[in-house]
Image (cartoon, helix red, strand yellow):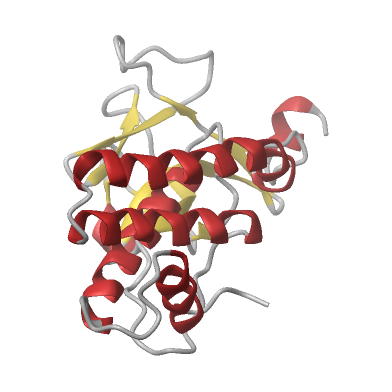
Amino acid sequence: MALTLLQAETNARTLTRHDSDTRFSQTQWRIWGNQEYRRMRTWLRQEDVAPQFGLITSADQTVALAASLTLSGISATLEGVHLVEADVGGGFYRPMLKADVLNRNSHGAGGYTFREQAGVIVFGPDGLFSGTVRVHYHNTPADLTADSNPFVIPVECEVALTLRTCGWIAVRDGEGAAGKKAWDDAAQALLDEALPALQARHGVHPSYSGLHVVLGY
């Protein structure tokens, strides 16, 4: 059963011995909880962690010659693009490579690239791509506001998220940066231990949709 907003707050209060006092409000804790929720989701979407967790696939997008795609047109809360695939017909899509940082127009023969730039997806080589694409992306999660709202994160990350909120409670209790670091370090140790399982379930894998076109899977 997923960790809920109220359950996480209750756990954090117990761990920091604030079960029945009012030294910080529920409203304040929820600010910390949602802050750490967004931080956790951003960490998960990294390519070497669990980029397929929470991954959303857009509808097909038509790109005119030399045009770009506006990220806000795909999703108002889009946080990051994981992959762009070009429609090659017959129900198949070919993954585009991310543009080289130093040479954005470098590409394989007959291939195209994409890059995020100032709120848009730009295709390369510059001015040469047109066609239909779909975008795999992550949204920034909305703040949780009700007791029963679940944190949408893998179960292995739930305790770590709670511990990170304890770090903010430690600061409020006057323990300063050292107190917060102790809780953050404990959370990171759990995440380091969970990383292989997260990568196995939600990491990049050869069977990922579209790669069979290029790699033969």
Q: Is residue 48 left or right of residue 8?
A: right
Q: Is residue 181 left or right of residue 215?
A: left
Q: Residue at x 75, y 33 (%)?
A: 206
Q: Position of residue 128 (x, y in %)?
A: 34, 28
Q: Nearer the viewer, residue 94 or 7?
A: 7
Q: Nearer the viewer, residue 207 or 29?
A: 29
Q: Residue at x 19, y 46 (%)?
A: 176
Q: Nearer the viewer, residue 77 or 34?
A: 34
Whether residue 54 is visible, yes or no, is no
Q: Is residue 136 left or right of residue 183?
A: right
Quadrant into which the C terminus falls: top right
Q: Nearer the viewer, residue 20 or 118?
A: 20
Q: Is residue 9 left or right of residue 101?
A: right
Q: Position of residue 169 (x, y in %)?
A: 28, 62
Q: Residue at x 23, y 83 (%)?
A: 22
Q: Is residue 106 above or below residue 58?
A: above
